[in-house]
Amino acid sequence: MSSTSEFIRVDVNMISCVGIARCGGCLRVCPVGIFEKNGDTPAVVEKNQDECILCELCVQACNPEAITIRKLYEA
Amino acid sequence: MRLLEHESKRILEKYRIPLPVGRLVSPGELLKIDTPVMLKAQIPVGGRGKAGGILEASDAEDAQQKVSLLLQSNLRGYIPKSVYMEEKKTVRQEFFMGVTYDTVAKAPLAIFSPVGGVDIEELAQQQPELVRKEHFTVASRLPVHRAREIVAETGISGKLLLGLSSVLSTIAEVFLDYDATVVEINPLGLMDDGRLIALDCHMEIDDDAVFRHADIAALEKEIGRVEGEKHMSDFERRAAGIDNLDHRGVAGRVIEFDGNLGLIIGGGGASLTAFDAIRSHGGRPANYCEIGGNPSVLKVKELTRLILSKPGVDKIAVIMNVVSNTRVDLVARGIVKGILESGKNPARTIAVFRIPGAWEEEGFKILSKYGIPIQGRTISIDEAARIAAKNSN
């Protein structure tokens, strides 16, 4: 999938994700709007990924551990 | 917000401080005067008299000509929009009195001098014994008996002491009531008949408190109240638009210059220091700017793009003091992204990147990836400015 981000890549594993109705932690805790609602599932807002402040609140809030954050400048 | 003299005097009038009889003169108005008058250009800046902004006129024709002259003058960067005409007063003695806020002591400060009509900072330096200063608190204000102590210490006594201390106590009331940062009467004139009259007044209201005073807020909105010589350029307007993209931090307070080195520099004293240092090392800034308060990556990116879009600008210097609330990595992301989106090479475009502080390890990793030399906190702002000037010439 193409990304407009240069530095940060946030991914949600849709196989593990249990949906917003049952969890939705990422949408609640992200302070910089990385996630948006797409039906019952969270979607990553591509253009906002470089705003990620690496707080990892979303990672902690995600019960099924479906979120990964990668620093592209370390790759 | 600095008030014009006539606006300040309307406030003094409410507090019953005696003033010369005066009124605003409209451009082209036919004047009728019987006695000599003083014509005073209404500009929001000090040193007006020395700049030729106060003229005396003896008759109507003379006054008419001088009003026209004042309205066409460029006085310390301002073109007066109005002229205040006052009766000329002959004074026996002039005094200085003012109230300001001492940010070090965190308290209001009353200042009095038996020598008025002069630059008070200069006088305080040359003859400190002639300038009496006293702090007071917002809670207890400056009652007349305390004002009397301040004035009496300069050797003034009798009826004059009572009159002066009453005015000093009153301007402290004005200062507190109006959330002012400065209220100054200079000079306060003593007439032959013993009356005290406020001949000039300088008043500044705390910008953050203007909304608490409907009359001042209305003045602020008045179109054409003050006309500066310099208008915002299209570049500056676009930068201000970037700053309004979101609420996070500041990245768009920009002043345009005609050099070749774009600046993205930290706010406050550090940006002034960096700007001056770059110039002193022979650099030619394309802009002054202030960033801080942890701006979003988007804002920094857009500001970088804007600066690089200026014809003749192919290098940018990124300099901030040691940051605590602004994150080095987020600024680095914005800068690099802005350069890439401008179709340029970050390593060749950044003349210097000197931001030490919060999240610097992450920031330095980003810089390393793009081959940008890292200048840490051991490099002073002056040294960073020297490097920037060298790399941009």
Image (cartoon, coloured by chain):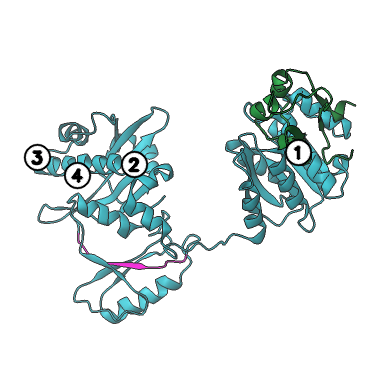
Chain colours: A green, B cyan
SS class of the residue under badge 2? loop
Image quadrant of residue B69? bottom left
The answer to whether residue B216 is above or below residue B65 is: above
SS of the residue under disc 1: loop
Horizontal and vertical percent for residue B248? 61, 38
From this view, report whether residue B351 is shown above or below residue B227: above
Q: Residues within 10 Å of mark 1 (few under 14, many from 20)?
A: some
Disc 4: host chain? B
- Write down the residue under mark 2: B179
Query: Going from the N terminus, do you reach mark 2 or mark 3 first?
Result: 3
Asked if disc 1 and disc 2 are in contact, CB closer than 8 Å, the reply is no
The span from disc 2 to disc 3 (Cα, nearest Å) is 32 Å
Q: Mark 3 points at which residue?
A: B158
- Specify the segment rendered in magenta: B79-90
Who's the residue at 32% across and 45% down the image?
B183
Chain designation of label 1: A
Q: Distance between the residues labelled 4 and 3?
A: 15 Å
Which residue type carries mark 3? Gly
Label 1 and label 2 in one chain: no
Is residue B171 at all visible to an observer of this figure? yes
B339 drawn magenta? no
Please report, as a chain letter, where disc 3 is located: B
> For the residues marked 2 and 4, what is the alpha-carbon distance in whole angstroms?
18 Å
